[in-house]
Amino acid sequence: MTTTGVRPEMAVAGSTAEMLDAGKLLPRLNKLNDSGRLAQAIGEDAAAKLIQDVDKAARTKASAISRVKLAKQIAVGAATVGGAGYLGHKAFGILGGGH
């Protein structure tokens, strides 16, 4: 399935918005394009543009996910370094290096 959530015409207040997964849609569009059916349905130029746009959306999503993962790794690293700094400071104080 390339979509998740509730279709707009069926949505009520608080429904999960329908989302399209471009990564799952792209192979299906390519298959339709390879068979000639996509171009037959919407024209060659529109088919090419649609595939390009979906590809761009899939790459943008992958890039955004990578950025989120990087941010999480940085946050974990910062917490680890901050925690180690705090623990080091306390140990230094306990061992007689502090006041």
Image: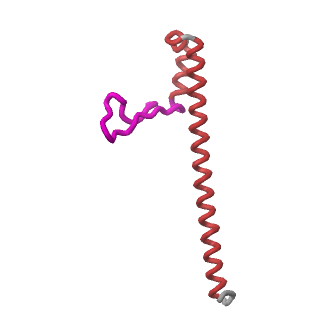
Q: Residue 75: x and y, percent?
A: 59, 59
Which image quarter is the C terminus in?
A: bottom right
Q: Residue 92: x and y, percent?
A: 66, 83
Q: Is residue 67 left or right of residue 40?
A: right
Please name the colour scheme applied to the rendered image: secondary structure
Quadrant hosting residue 34: top right
Between residue 82 and residue 36, name the one nearer to us.
82
Q: Is residue 32 left or right of residue 98?
A: left
Magenta segment includes 5: yes
Q: What residue appears at the point 47 percent right and 32 percent down from the top-left corner?
A: 20
Quadrant hosting residue 93: bottom right
The vertical placement of 33 against 16, above or below, is above
Magenta segment includes 16: yes
Q: Residue 89: x and y, percent?
A: 64, 79
Q: What residue appears at the point 49 percent right and 11 percent down from the top-left corner?
A: 41
Quadrant hosting residue 7: top left
Q: Residue 64: x and y, percent?
A: 58, 42
The vertical placement of 63 against 51, above or below, is below
Between residue 80 and residue 31, name the one nearer to us.
80
The vertical placement of 41 against 53, above or below, is above
Which image quarter is the N terminus in?
A: top left
Q: What residue appears at the point 55 percent right and 27 percent down from the top-left corner?
A: 26
Q: Residue furthest front?
A: 13
Q: Which residues are magenta?
A: 1-24
Tally the marks. Answer: 0
